[in-house]
Protein backbone atom coordinates (compact mmCIF):
# COMPACT_ATOMS: atom_id res chain seq x y z
CA UNK A 1 0.00 0.00 0.00
CA UNK A 2 1.07 3.59 -0.41
CA UNK A 3 2.15 5.48 2.69
CA UNK A 4 -0.80 7.83 2.60
CA UNK A 5 -3.22 4.90 2.45
CA UNK A 6 -1.54 3.21 5.39
CA UNK A 7 -1.49 6.38 7.48
CA UNK A 8 -5.16 7.09 6.85
CA UNK A 9 -6.07 3.52 7.74
CA UNK A 10 -4.14 3.82 10.99
CA UNK A 11 -6.10 6.97 11.90
CA UNK A 12 -9.44 5.37 11.13
CA UNK A 13 -9.16 1.99 12.85
CA UNK A 14 -8.75 3.29 16.42
CA UNK A 15 -7.47 0.55 18.77
CA UNK A 16 -6.10 -1.46 15.85
CA UNK A 17 -3.67 1.35 14.98
CA UNK A 18 -1.00 0.03 17.33
CA UNK A 19 -0.94 -3.35 15.61
CA UNK A 20 -1.23 -1.88 12.11
CA UNK A 21 1.87 0.24 12.75
CA UNK A 22 4.05 -2.69 13.88
CA UNK A 23 5.59 -4.70 11.07
CA UNK A 24 6.83 -7.76 12.90
CA UNK A 25 3.55 -8.79 14.58
CA UNK A 26 1.81 -8.38 11.21
CA UNK A 27 4.48 -10.42 9.42
CA UNK A 28 4.46 -13.11 12.10
CA UNK A 29 0.73 -13.58 11.55
CA UNK A 30 1.29 -13.52 7.78
CA UNK A 31 3.90 -16.29 8.03
CA UNK A 32 1.55 -18.30 10.24
CA UNK A 33 -1.32 -17.92 7.76
CA UNK A 34 0.86 -18.94 4.80
CA UNK A 35 2.29 -21.89 6.71
CA UNK A 36 -1.27 -22.94 7.53
CA UNK A 37 -2.04 -22.99 3.80
CA UNK A 38 0.10 -26.09 3.30
CA UNK A 39 -1.30 -27.69 6.44
CA UNK A 40 -4.89 -27.22 5.30
CA UNK A 41 -4.05 -28.29 1.73
CA UNK A 42 -2.63 -31.54 3.06
CA UNK A 43 -5.39 -32.13 5.62
CA UNK A 44 -8.17 -31.52 3.06
CA UNK A 45 -6.63 -33.59 0.25
CA UNK A 46 -9.40 -36.20 0.40
CA UNK A 47 -12.17 -33.63 0.69
CA UNK A 48 -11.34 -30.89 -1.82
CA UNK A 49 -9.45 -31.64 -5.08
CA UNK A 50 -6.47 -29.34 -5.76
CA UNK A 51 -7.92 -27.32 -8.65
CA UNK A 52 -11.21 -26.85 -6.78
CA UNK A 53 -9.37 -25.61 -3.70
CA UNK A 54 -7.33 -23.18 -5.82
CA UNK A 55 -10.36 -21.93 -7.77
CA UNK A 56 -12.60 -21.25 -4.79
CA UNK A 57 -9.73 -19.90 -2.69
CA UNK A 58 -9.04 -17.07 -5.11
CA UNK A 59 -12.65 -16.52 -6.18
CA UNK A 60 -13.76 -15.84 -2.61
CA UNK A 61 -10.59 -13.86 -1.87
CA UNK A 62 -11.33 -11.65 -4.88
CA UNK A 63 -14.85 -11.02 -3.62
CA UNK A 64 -13.39 -9.90 -0.27
CA UNK A 65 -10.71 -7.76 -1.90
CA UNK A 66 -12.73 -5.92 -4.54
CA UNK A 67 -14.44 -3.39 -2.22
CA UNK A 68 -11.01 -2.26 -1.03
CA UNK A 69 -9.29 -2.48 -4.40
CA UNK A 70 -11.99 -1.00 -6.65
CA UNK A 71 -11.12 2.72 -6.23
CA UNK A 72 -7.45 1.95 -6.94
CA UNK A 73 -8.35 -0.31 -9.87
CA UNK A 74 -10.34 2.46 -11.54
CA UNK A 75 -7.43 4.85 -11.18
CA UNK A 76 -4.75 2.33 -12.22
CA UNK A 77 -6.62 0.63 -15.05
CA UNK A 78 -4.80 2.51 -17.86
CA UNK A 79 -1.42 1.42 -16.46
CA UNK A 80 -2.60 -2.17 -15.96
CA UNK A 81 -3.97 -2.31 -19.52
CA UNK A 82 -0.76 -0.84 -20.94
CA UNK A 83 1.27 -3.49 -19.10
CA UNK A 84 -1.17 -6.37 -19.48
CA UNK A 85 1.45 -8.88 -20.64
CA UNK A 86 3.56 -8.73 -17.48
CA UNK A 87 0.45 -8.52 -15.28
CA UNK A 88 -0.96 -11.61 -16.99
CA UNK A 89 2.33 -13.49 -16.67
CA UNK A 90 2.75 -12.67 -12.98
CA UNK A 91 -0.87 -13.59 -12.21
CA UNK A 92 -0.55 -16.85 -14.12
CA UNK A 93 2.61 -17.75 -12.21
CA UNK A 94 1.74 -16.72 -8.65
CA UNK A 95 -2.03 -17.18 -8.45
CA UNK A 96 -2.64 -19.81 -11.11
CA UNK A 97 0.28 -22.19 -11.55
CA UNK A 98 1.85 -22.07 -8.08
CA UNK A 99 -1.36 -22.85 -6.23
CA UNK A 100 -2.45 -25.78 -8.36
CA UNK A 101 1.03 -27.31 -8.16
CA UNK A 102 1.22 -26.79 -4.39
CA UNK A 103 -2.14 -28.43 -3.67
CA UNK A 104 -1.46 -31.20 -6.19
CA UNK A 105 1.91 -31.95 -4.61
CA UNK A 106 0.29 -32.12 -1.18
CA UNK A 107 -1.83 -35.02 -2.45
CA UNK A 108 1.32 -37.16 -2.44
CA UNK A 109 3.77 -35.70 0.06
CA UNK A 110 3.67 -34.40 3.60
CA UNK A 111 3.12 -30.81 4.63
CA UNK A 112 6.43 -31.05 6.50
CA UNK A 113 8.33 -31.91 3.33
CA UNK A 114 6.48 -29.16 1.47
CA UNK A 115 7.41 -26.47 3.99
CA UNK A 116 11.06 -27.49 4.17
CA UNK A 117 11.43 -27.58 0.38
CA UNK A 118 9.88 -24.11 0.21
CA UNK A 119 12.53 -22.85 2.62
CA UNK A 120 15.06 -23.02 -0.23
CA UNK A 121 13.32 -20.12 -1.99
CA UNK A 122 16.00 -17.48 -1.22
CA UNK A 123 18.67 -19.62 -2.88
CA UNK A 124 16.46 -20.38 -5.86
CA UNK A 125 15.73 -16.68 -6.35
CA UNK A 126 19.47 -16.10 -6.75
CA UNK A 127 19.66 -18.79 -9.45
CA UNK A 128 16.63 -17.55 -11.37
CA UNK A 129 17.77 -13.94 -11.06
CA UNK A 130 21.13 -14.80 -12.58
CA UNK A 131 19.64 -16.88 -15.41
CA UNK A 132 16.62 -14.75 -16.31
CA UNK A 133 17.66 -11.21 -15.42
CA UNK A 134 21.42 -11.50 -15.67
CA UNK A 135 21.91 -10.57 -12.01
CA UNK A 136 25.51 -10.69 -10.91
CA UNK A 137 26.26 -13.28 -8.24
CA UNK A 138 29.31 -13.52 -6.01
CA UNK A 139 31.21 -16.73 -5.23
CA UNK A 140 29.75 -16.53 -1.73
CA UNK A 141 26.20 -16.45 -3.09
CA UNK A 142 26.92 -19.37 -5.42
CA UNK A 143 28.30 -21.35 -2.49
CA UNK A 144 25.20 -20.54 -0.46
CA UNK A 145 22.94 -21.72 -3.28
CA UNK A 146 24.84 -24.99 -3.55
CA UNK A 147 24.56 -25.63 0.20
CA UNK A 148 20.83 -24.83 0.25
CA UNK A 149 20.12 -27.06 -2.76
CA UNK A 150 22.02 -29.86 -1.06
CA UNK A 151 19.58 -29.46 1.83
CA UNK A 152 16.58 -29.65 -0.51
CA UNK A 153 17.98 -32.81 -2.13
CA UNK A 154 18.52 -34.34 1.31
CA UNK A 155 14.84 -33.80 2.13
CA UNK A 156 13.58 -35.01 -1.26
CA UNK A 157 15.82 -38.10 -1.08
CA UNK A 158 14.72 -38.72 2.53
CA UNK A 159 18.34 -39.12 3.50
CA UNK A 160 19.01 -41.90 0.97
CA UNK A 161 21.27 -40.88 -1.97
CA UNK A 162 20.20 -44.03 -3.82
CA UNK A 163 16.75 -42.50 -4.29
CA UNK A 164 18.30 -39.70 -6.33
CA UNK A 165 20.67 -42.01 -8.22
CA UNK A 166 17.81 -44.33 -9.17
CA UNK A 167 15.41 -41.41 -9.78
CA UNK A 168 12.92 -42.84 -7.28
CA UNK A 169 11.53 -39.45 -6.39
CA UNK A 170 8.27 -38.90 -4.56
CA UNK A 171 6.07 -37.27 -7.18
CA UNK A 172 4.64 -34.91 -4.59
CA UNK A 173 8.10 -33.62 -3.65
CA UNK A 174 8.93 -33.10 -7.32
CA UNK A 175 5.71 -31.14 -7.89
CA UNK A 176 6.35 -28.97 -4.81
CA UNK A 177 9.85 -28.33 -6.12
CA UNK A 178 8.35 -27.17 -9.42
CA UNK A 179 5.95 -24.89 -7.57
CA UNK A 180 8.82 -23.30 -5.65
CA UNK A 181 10.74 -22.74 -8.89
CA UNK A 182 7.68 -20.97 -10.30
CA UNK A 183 7.49 -18.75 -7.25
CA UNK A 184 11.18 -17.96 -7.57
CA UNK A 185 10.58 -16.89 -11.18
CA UNK A 186 7.64 -14.77 -10.05
CA UNK A 187 9.79 -13.16 -7.35
CA UNK A 188 12.42 -12.17 -9.89
CA UNK A 189 9.95 -10.91 -12.51
CA UNK A 190 8.01 -8.97 -9.89
CA UNK A 191 10.44 -6.08 -10.31
CA UNK A 192 8.88 -5.53 -13.76
CA UNK A 193 5.35 -5.06 -12.44
CA UNK A 194 3.72 -1.73 -13.30
CA UNK A 195 3.85 1.06 -10.75
CA UNK A 196 0.29 0.67 -9.52
CA UNK A 197 -1.27 0.34 -6.08
CA UNK A 198 -0.62 -3.09 -4.47
CA UNK A 199 -4.36 -3.76 -4.17
CA UNK A 200 -4.89 -2.99 -7.86
CA UNK A 201 -2.08 -5.34 -8.80
CA UNK A 202 -3.32 -8.08 -6.46
CA UNK A 203 -6.89 -7.87 -7.78
CA UNK A 204 -5.72 -7.98 -11.41
CA UNK A 205 -3.44 -10.93 -10.58
CA UNK A 206 -6.34 -12.77 -8.95
CA UNK A 207 -8.53 -12.34 -12.04
CA UNK A 208 -5.77 -13.76 -14.25
CA UNK A 209 -5.06 -16.59 -11.82
CA UNK A 210 -8.71 -17.61 -11.64
CA UNK A 211 -8.86 -17.67 -15.45
CA UNK A 212 -5.79 -19.95 -15.51
CA UNK A 213 -7.20 -22.27 -12.85
CA UNK A 214 -10.71 -22.52 -14.36
CA UNK A 215 -9.90 -25.03 -17.17
CA UNK A 216 -8.19 -27.35 -14.66
CA UNK A 217 -11.19 -27.08 -12.36
CA UNK A 218 -13.55 -27.90 -15.21
CA UNK A 219 -11.40 -30.94 -16.05
CA UNK A 220 -11.64 -32.08 -12.43
CA UNK A 221 -15.41 -31.78 -12.57
CA UNK A 222 -15.56 -33.62 -15.90
CA UNK A 223 -13.41 -36.45 -14.50
CA UNK A 224 -15.72 -36.83 -11.50
CA UNK A 225 -13.43 -35.35 -8.85
CA UNK A 226 -15.89 -33.38 -6.78
CA UNK A 227 -15.75 -31.55 -3.47
CA UNK A 228 -16.96 -33.83 -0.69
CA UNK A 229 -20.01 -32.14 0.88
CA UNK A 230 -18.74 -31.97 4.46
CA UNK A 231 -18.04 -29.35 7.10
CA UNK A 232 -14.31 -29.96 6.66
CA UNK A 233 -14.52 -28.98 2.99
CA UNK A 234 -16.23 -25.68 3.77
CA UNK A 235 -13.77 -24.90 6.57
CA UNK A 236 -10.77 -25.63 4.35
CA UNK A 237 -12.04 -23.36 1.57
CA UNK A 238 -12.95 -20.65 4.07
CA UNK A 239 -9.51 -20.74 5.67
CA UNK A 240 -7.47 -20.56 2.46
CA UNK A 241 -9.75 -17.82 1.08
CA UNK A 242 -9.62 -15.51 4.09
CA UNK A 243 -6.32 -16.06 5.88
CA UNK A 244 -3.45 -16.94 3.48
CA UNK A 245 -5.10 -15.05 0.60
CA UNK A 246 -6.96 -11.91 1.68
CA UNK A 247 -5.52 -11.06 5.11
CA UNK A 248 -1.97 -12.30 4.58
CA UNK A 249 -1.49 -10.24 1.43
CA UNK A 250 -2.82 -7.11 3.15
CA UNK A 251 -0.48 -7.65 6.10
CA UNK A 252 2.46 -8.46 3.84
CA UNK A 253 1.96 -5.27 1.82
CA UNK A 254 1.83 -3.27 5.05
CA UNK A 255 5.03 -4.96 6.26
CA UNK A 256 6.84 -3.96 3.07
CA UNK A 257 5.60 -0.41 3.55
CA UNK A 258 6.90 -0.28 7.13
CA UNK A 259 10.32 -1.98 6.90
CA UNK A 260 11.02 -2.47 3.19
CA UNK A 261 11.00 -5.53 0.92
CA UNK A 262 14.45 -6.85 1.85
CA UNK A 263 13.82 -6.98 5.61
CA UNK A 264 10.31 -8.34 5.00
CA UNK A 265 11.60 -11.10 2.75
CA UNK A 266 14.28 -12.07 5.25
CA UNK A 267 11.79 -12.22 8.11
CA UNK A 268 9.42 -14.41 6.11
CA UNK A 269 12.03 -17.17 6.23
CA UNK A 270 10.42 -18.12 9.55
CA UNK A 271 7.44 -19.48 7.61
CA UNK A 272 8.87 -22.96 6.86
CA UNK A 273 9.85 -23.39 10.51
CA UNK A 274 6.31 -22.47 11.59
CA UNK A 275 4.89 -24.83 8.98
CA UNK A 276 7.07 -27.71 10.15
CA UNK A 277 5.87 -27.18 13.71
CA UNK A 278 2.22 -27.00 12.63
CA UNK A 279 2.58 -30.18 10.56
CA UNK A 280 3.87 -32.09 13.56
CA UNK A 281 1.29 -30.57 15.90
CA UNK A 282 -1.88 -30.88 13.82
CA UNK A 283 -1.12 -33.63 11.29
CA UNK A 284 1.02 -35.86 13.47
CA UNK A 285 3.87 -35.81 10.95
CA UNK A 286 7.24 -36.95 12.25
CA UNK A 287 10.43 -34.90 12.21
CA UNK A 288 13.24 -37.21 11.09
CA UNK A 289 16.99 -36.83 11.02
CA UNK A 290 17.06 -36.10 7.27
CA UNK A 291 14.60 -33.23 7.85
CA UNK A 292 16.90 -31.71 10.46
CA UNK A 293 19.99 -32.17 8.28
CA UNK A 294 18.27 -30.77 5.21
CA UNK A 295 16.90 -27.75 7.06
CA UNK A 296 20.32 -27.06 8.60
CA UNK A 297 21.88 -27.04 5.14
CA UNK A 298 19.15 -24.78 3.72
CA UNK A 299 19.50 -22.24 6.53
CA UNK A 300 23.30 -22.37 6.30
CA UNK A 301 23.08 -21.71 2.57
CA UNK A 302 20.81 -18.72 3.11
CA UNK A 303 23.22 -17.29 5.69
CA UNK A 304 26.21 -17.86 3.43
CA UNK A 305 24.49 -16.25 0.45
CA UNK A 306 23.55 -13.32 2.65
CA UNK A 307 20.67 -12.14 0.47
CA UNK A 308 16.91 -12.21 0.98
CA UNK A 309 14.41 -13.17 -1.74
CA UNK A 310 12.82 -10.48 -3.85
CA UNK A 311 9.37 -11.49 -2.59
CA UNK A 312 8.02 -13.94 -0.05
CA UNK A 313 6.01 -17.14 -0.86
CA UNK A 314 2.30 -17.51 -0.69
Image (cartoon, rainbow, N blue to C red):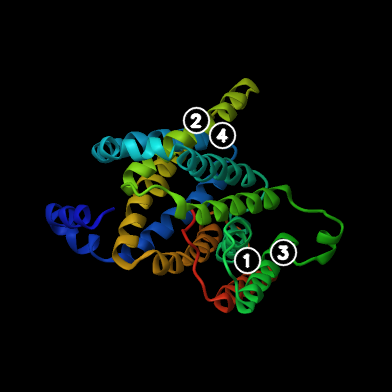
Classify residue 63 by image quadrant.
top left
Q: Nearer the viewer, mark 3 or mark 2?
A: 2
**Circle 2 is placed at which residue position?**
211
Classify residue 127 by image quadrant.
bottom right
Identified at 41% across, 45% down, the residue is 245
- Residue farthest to the top? 222
**Circle 3 is placed at which residue position?**
153
In the displayed structure, would residue 199 be above or below residue 252? above
Q: Position of residue 197 (x, y in %)?
A: 31, 47
Q: CA distance from mark 2 to mark 1?
A: 38 Å
Q: Nearer the viewer, mark 4 or mark 2?
A: 2
Classed neighbour count for the residue bearing mark 1: other residues with Cα under 10 Å, few (<14), some (14–19), many (≥20): some
All told, the count of numbered labels is: 4
SS type, badge 2: helix
Q: Position of residue 194 (x, y in %)?
A: 39, 47
SS type, badge 3: helix
Q: Is 152 or 189 nearer to us in this picture?
A: 189
Identified at 77% across, 53% down, the residue is 169
Amino acid sequence: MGKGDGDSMVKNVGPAAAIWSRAYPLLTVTALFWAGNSIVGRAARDLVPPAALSFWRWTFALVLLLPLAWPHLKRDWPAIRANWRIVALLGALAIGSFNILLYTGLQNTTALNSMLIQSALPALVLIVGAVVMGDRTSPRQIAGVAVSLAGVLAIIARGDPAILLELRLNIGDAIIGGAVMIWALYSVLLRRRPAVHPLSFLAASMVVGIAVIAPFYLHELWSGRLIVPAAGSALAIAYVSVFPSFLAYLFFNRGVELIGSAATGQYMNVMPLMGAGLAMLFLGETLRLFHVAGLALIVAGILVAGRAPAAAQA
